[in-house]
Image (tube, rainbow, N blue to C red):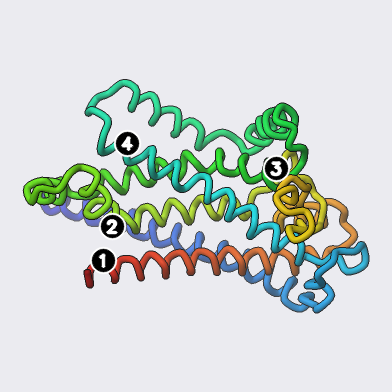
């Protein structure tokens, strides 16, 4: 009987192991299949006209949308990252344990992470575009994206701070450091990998967002002229790379350029992620050397 039970457990473990292997292989195959399909159809269509500075109906240049994507993502993260990290620091380091306010904030953040982006777009349309009078603009789109990614940054930062051992805090307090110094000199440097992970997730959502930006940023394929318009250029309508891809695909007139745009968008996301990881590793090396 004991032999039979041991044999049954080994059989179940083997079945579970092969199911996991099969799921992994299927996931990898689907991923590489999608990437291969996009690259095979898009790389041959990467022409110089596609990177012209000005967009026309003939060249359907993606360069204005590419620049606008960088601008709107940078502005959104500039707004959301300090707020998200600051809120997480308060919830973990300053708020009392078991505080109902903390529980409500965490529940609200988790709920907001699951709200469809179209809801954020409608909110941005009603509040930023209409109520504040910003119209369809780079600023309205950036603030809408900032609200979208704020819960992601806050929750991932909070989890990263909670993962820091309490011994670090106790050692800092024992040496006479205050709470603020402990947070910025001991806790935050240790939590940098988790924080950067949240920023990468937020960055990917900013770069790939379409629905919310259609209602707030518009779809005008022009780069804001900051030299002539100054600060007013932030309130001009723009088109991001994901929106550009959506517009071309919905028109159905530039299929080849659509695949080429998808390749550029894919390369942009990968480059930004690799750059963020490299930056995080550099910070970690400097912290260890210090």
Q: Which class describes the residues within 10 Å of circle 2: few (<14), some (14-19), or many (20+)? A: some
**On the image, numbered disc 4 is attached to which residue?**
90
**Cα gap from disc 3 to disc 1, whole angstroms:** 40 Å
Examine the image and state in which quarter residue 242 appears. Answer: bottom right
Which numbered disc, 1 or 4, marks the residue that appears first in the sequence? 4
- SS for callout 1: helix
**Cα gap from disc 4 to disc 3, whole angstroms:** 32 Å
**On the image, numbered disc 2 is attached to which residue?**
189
**Cα gap from disc 3 to disc 2, whole angstroms:** 36 Å
**Cα gap from disc 1 to disc 4, whole angstroms:** 23 Å
Could you tell me if the residues under marks 1 and 2 are in contact, i.e. CB atoms within 8 Å?
yes
**On the image, numbered disc 3 is attached to which residue?**
211
Residue drawn at x 58%, y 55% is 74
Which numbered disc, 4 or 3, marks the residue that appears first in the sequence? 4
Image coords of residue 118 (percent x, y): 67, 36
Image coords of residue 136 (percent x, y): 77, 41
Q: Which mark is residue 128?
A: none
**Cα gap from disc 2 to disc 4, whole angstroms:** 16 Å
Which numbered disc, 1 or 2, marks the residue that appears first in the sequence? 2
Examine the image and state in which quarter residue 57 appears. Answer: bottom right
Examine the image and state in which quarter residue 21 appears. Answer: bottom left
Q: Which mark is residue 287?
A: 1
């Amino acid at each position: 009987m004991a032999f039979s039970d041991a044999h049954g457990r080994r059989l179940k473990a083997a079945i579970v192991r092969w199911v996991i292997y099969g799921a992994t292989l299927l996931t990898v195959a689907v991923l590489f299949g999608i990437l291969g399909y996009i690259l095979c159809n898009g790389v041959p269509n990467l022409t110089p006209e596609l990177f012209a500075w000005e967009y026309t109906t003939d060249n359907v240049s993606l360069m204005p949308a590419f620049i606008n994507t960088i601008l709107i993502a940078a502005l959104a993260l500039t707004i959301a990252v300090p707020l998200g990290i600051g809120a997480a620091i308060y919830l973990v380091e300053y708020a009392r344990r078991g505080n109902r306010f903390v529980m409500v904030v965490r529940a609200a953040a988790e709920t907001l992470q699951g709200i469809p982006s179209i809801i954020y777009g409608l909110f941005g349309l009603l509040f930023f575009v209409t109520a504040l009078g910003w119209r369809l603009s780079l600023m309205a789109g950036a603030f809408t994206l900032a609200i979208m990614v704020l819960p992601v940054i806050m929750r991932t930062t909070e989890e990263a701070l909670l993962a820091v051992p309490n011994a670090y805090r106790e050692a800092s307090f024992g040496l006479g450091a205050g709470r603020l110094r402990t947070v910025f000199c001991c806790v935050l440097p240790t939590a940098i990998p988790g924080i950067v992970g949240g920023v990468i997730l937020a960055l990917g959502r900013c770069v790939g967002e379409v629905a919310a930006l259609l209602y707030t940023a518009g779809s005008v394929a022009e780069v804001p002229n900051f030299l002539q318009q100054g600060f007013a250029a932030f309130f001009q309508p723009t088109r991001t790379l994901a929106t550009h891809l959506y517009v071309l695909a919905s028109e159905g007139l530039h299929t080849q350029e659509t695949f080429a745009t998808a390749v550029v968008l894919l390369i942009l996301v990968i480059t930004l992620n690799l750059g963020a990881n490299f930056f995080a590793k550099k910070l970690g090396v400097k912290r260890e050397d210090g």
